């Protein structure tokens, strides 16, 4: 098994450890490797390789047409340098998903060992879906979950084993025509998780999947669908790390969540892509009557992230919450935020965004608050705070508010602050080095969100912040 | 014997303006010195200079701590070697709990100096014990351990937490910058009792104050009066009572001559 991955806050960690833990990559070894580039034949081939039902093949092909028709978005960050013909759209590292750890091939196991997955599982996970390349290779559900009727599978496997359930919900929250990258994902998606939680079932432990890009120029287009039936609860956690490569990579996922009456879903992301990755993700949840959706979204790394988790509150009393952290270092642009749409009476939402810019990095908060006519008694509070660590860094706020109902309560607060000389001096006068003092101020700044993370992720998040502050990344 | 703290002909500028114009002062372990003076005389400048604030530029003179010049030491190194400044206006650090902050600071000091014959990090239970003991002394509710440092604290709470930090970090030289300002009579007594409890034969204290009233609780052996960047007068405890009675004007007038 792995070396003990100790959750410590020791300050003296070095950049070499980061490379050891996150920057390594194993020699590529693939059973099947598609050609670079995007066309009808590739999409047909993906569908054929996966032995998919015809409706999915048709769905992919229609989405591809939509992708071609839609212009490149010219807002947010600069994505014009993405060369869609220079990307692999499908790879799989082993022939099929595995259920037990022993069956996972050794080189893949080695990668996971270094990420500490079995360790994590021993601690508190009830199921692991680990995505290596485009396929789920390791999938393990604890028996108690299966007995409760909870389905936790790779998306490809779910399509094969539960085609009706997948067909009923797939693309209903985020239609393929929603945006250019949702269309791209709909055409070439591979991997991702499928979760179904039956009525009244509470999944006590977080369900978790690790994602990892490990082939140069390989896009990762995972597709996740979560359905929480009436009165149920599930917490899904995704952690992303990526090895460092020299040429640009594209990650474009779609995550759809359906939350039925009185159910609650929390979706936690810690994402730490290497600094050459375009991370363009569409995440959206529909919350029906008295349902609750919570997004906890931590964005580090990547060249450009454009991600705005959304909650559509379509039943009365629904509640949406979005907690977003973004850290932009040198050469990075984090365009992140959230969308809340009030489509029913007495719905409520909270958006809390914290962004940090360092070494010329750029963060933008981009948010939408929309209240439809008839959504009486709705309440929303948006708060975005930006912290600039130096003069060369930048932060912008783009809060869009569209309210078509009078009987609502809306609050919006924004702040931009710099790490002050006086704060640094105060901490240093107690014996902390300047780097330790700055790290402590940054950790404190995002603490209201970090404390919402599962313990191991909170530790990991603080560690990643520490590494970013030491400037050992990128 | 090497003096504990020796300030020699200290001249300090802030943003190009001369504030301190030649201070000489020596403090031995176990001594409490009070620096009194009117507003704008340079009291806080002296405090910040001793702690190593980058804004305060020493243009002449020297500061020796246990025989070594501190001028090349950053604020962190000074703290690690046992110099402590209780701030007049402590900064709020939102999101950082008092306990986490104090443990990090204590560990930084232990790592740097091997204080208490132990350069390893303090264990969490051991730290808790230490912190809770000191909190009781300062009549701080245990919930302060998990509150964010100075975030939303009242003036009195901030000053008590400053002394808590002093008690936990156990310095050898403490500069208390107007620790009495903004305190009501009960808070003043609690804070003063905290300082007295921390006082020990190895510790030298430089107590900076505008008013005499804190000297009812903390008893300095030496009183110095700072006027326009210079020590205009030094004496024993009786000098404080004279100042209380007559104010600063007569010293200012004498200094002007």
Image: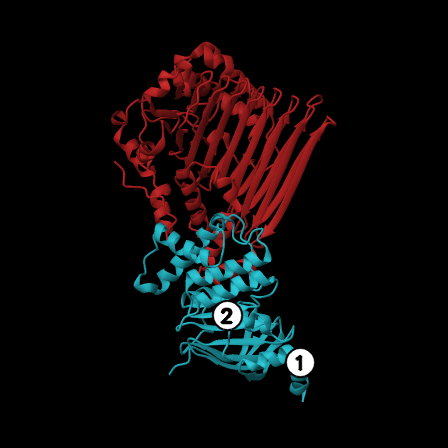
Chain colours: A red, B cyan
Image position of B73 (left or right of A63)? left
Image position of A329 (left or right of A145)? right
Residue for point 61% across, 40% down: A383
Q: Is residue A220 visible?
A: no
List x then y, in percent, for residue A63: 53, 19
Reply above or below: A262 against B135: above
Q: Secondary structure at mark 2?
A: strand
Mark 2 closeness class: few <14, some 14–19, many ≥20 residues within 10 Å: many
Q: Is residue B112 visible?
A: yes
Reply above or below: B147 against A85: below
Depth check, front residue: B200 or A33: B200
Report if the CB atoms under discs 2 and 1 are less than 8 Å apart.
Answer: no
Question: Residue beneath label 1, please?
Answer: B246
Question: Residue beneath label 2, please?
Answer: B175
Marks 2 and 1: which is nearer the front? 1
Which residue sits furthest bottom?
A: B257
> Considering only order in the chain, which callout, 1 or 2, is on the residue closer to the N terminus?
2
Depth check, front residue: A174 or A234: A234
Image position of A151 (left or right of A257)? left
The chain to which mark 1 is attached is B
Residue for point 71% across, 22% down: A373
Q: Both on one chain, marks 2 and 1? A: yes
The disc label shown at residue B200, or none = none
Which residue sits furthest right?
A: A406
Residue A398 position by quadrant: top right
The chain to which mark 2 is attached is B
Q: Secondary structure at mark 1?
A: helix
List x then y, in percent, for residue A442: 51, 49
């Amino acid at each position: 098994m792995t070396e003990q991955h100790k959750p410590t806050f020791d300050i003296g960690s070095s950049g070499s450890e980061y490379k050891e833990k996150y920057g390594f990559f194993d020699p590529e070894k693939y059973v099947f490797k598609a050609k670079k580039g995007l066309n009808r034949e590739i999409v047909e081939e993906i569908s054929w390789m996966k032995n998919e039902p015809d409706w999915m093949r048709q769905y992919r092909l229609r989405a591809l047409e939509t992708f071609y028709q839609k212009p490149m978005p010219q807002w947010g960050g600069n994505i014009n340098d993405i060369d869609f013909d220079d990307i692999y759209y499908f790879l799989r590292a082993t022939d099929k998903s595995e259920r037990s750890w022993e069956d996972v091939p050794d080189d893949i196991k080695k990668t996971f060992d270094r990420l500490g997955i079995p360790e994590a599982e021993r601690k508190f996970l009830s199921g692991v879906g680990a995505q290596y390349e485009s396929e789920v290779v390791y999938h393990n559900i604890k028996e108690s979950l299966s007995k409760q009727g909870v389905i936790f599978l790779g998306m490809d496997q779910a399509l094969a084993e539960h085609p009706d359930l997948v067909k009923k919900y797939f693309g209903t929250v985020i239609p393929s025509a929603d945006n250019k990258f949702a269309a791209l994902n709909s055409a070439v998606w591979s991997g991702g998780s499928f979760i179904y939680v039956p009525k009244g079932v509470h999944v006590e432990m977080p369900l978790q999947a690790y994602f990892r890009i490990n082939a140069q120029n390989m896009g990762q287009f995972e597709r996740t669908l979560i359905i929480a039936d009436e009165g149920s609860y599930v917490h899904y956690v995704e952690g992303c790390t990526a090895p460092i490569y020299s040429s640009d990579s594209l990650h474009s996922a779609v995550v759809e969540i359906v939350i039925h009456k009185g159910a609650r879903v929390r979706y936690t992301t810690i994402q730490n892509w290497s600094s050459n990755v375009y991370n363009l993700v569409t995440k959206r949840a529909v919350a029906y009557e008295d349902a609750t959706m919570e997004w906890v979204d931590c964005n580090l790394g990547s060249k450009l992230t454009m991600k705005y988790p959304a909650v559509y509150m379509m039943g009365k009393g629904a509640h949406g919450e979005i907690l977003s952290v973004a850290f932009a270092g040198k050469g990075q642009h984090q365009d992140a935020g959230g969308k809340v749409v009030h489509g029913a009476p007495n719905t409520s939402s909270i958006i809390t965004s914290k962004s940090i810019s360092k070494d010329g990095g750029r963060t933008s908060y981009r948010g939408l608050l929309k209240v439809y006519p008839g959504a009486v008694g709705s309440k929303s509070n948006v708060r975005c705070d930006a912290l600039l660590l130096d003069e060369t860094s930048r932060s912008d706020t783009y809060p869009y508010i569209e309210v078509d109902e009078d009987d609502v309560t809306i609050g919006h607060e924004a702040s931009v602050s710099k790490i002050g000389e006086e704060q640094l001096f105060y901490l240093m006068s107690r014996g902390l080095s300047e780097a330790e003092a700055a790290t402590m101020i940054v950790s404190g700044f995002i603490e209201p969100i970090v404390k919402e993370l599962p313990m191991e992720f909170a530790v990991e998040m603080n560690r990643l912040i520490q590494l970013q502050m030491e400037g050992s990344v990128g | 014997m090497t003096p504990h703290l020796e300030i020699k002909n200290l001249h300090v500028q802030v943003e190009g303006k001369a504030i301190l114009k030649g201070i000489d002062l020596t403090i031995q372990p176990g001594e409490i010195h009070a620096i009194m003076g009117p507003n704008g005389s340079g009291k806080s400048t002296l405090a910040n200079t001793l702690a190593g604030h980058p804004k305060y530029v020493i243009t002449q003179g020297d500061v020796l701590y246990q025989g070594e010049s501190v001028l090349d030491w950053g604020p962190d190194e000074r703290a690690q070697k046992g110099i402590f400044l209780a701030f007049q206006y402590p900064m709020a650090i939102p999101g950082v709990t008092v306990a986490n902050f104090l443990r990090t600071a204590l560990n930084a000091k232990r790592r740097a100096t091997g204080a208490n014959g132990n350069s390893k990090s303090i264990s969490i239970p051991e730290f808790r014990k230490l912190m809770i003991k000191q909190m009781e002394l300062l009549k701080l509710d245990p919930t302060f351990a998990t509150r964010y440092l100075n975030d939303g604290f009242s003036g009195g709470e901030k000053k008590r937490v400053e002394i808590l930090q002093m008690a936990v970090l156990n310095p050898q030289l403490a500069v208390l910058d107007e620790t009495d300002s903004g305190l009501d009579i009960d808070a003043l007594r609690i804070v003063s009792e905290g300082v007295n409890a921390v006082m020990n034969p190895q510790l030298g204290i430089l107590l900076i104050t505008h008013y005499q009233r804190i000297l009812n609780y903390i008893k300095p052996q030496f009183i110095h009066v700072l006027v326009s960047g210079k020590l205009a007068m030094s004496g024993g405890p009786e000098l404080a009572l004279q100042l209380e009675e007559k104010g600063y004007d007569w010293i200012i007038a004498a200094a002007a001559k």
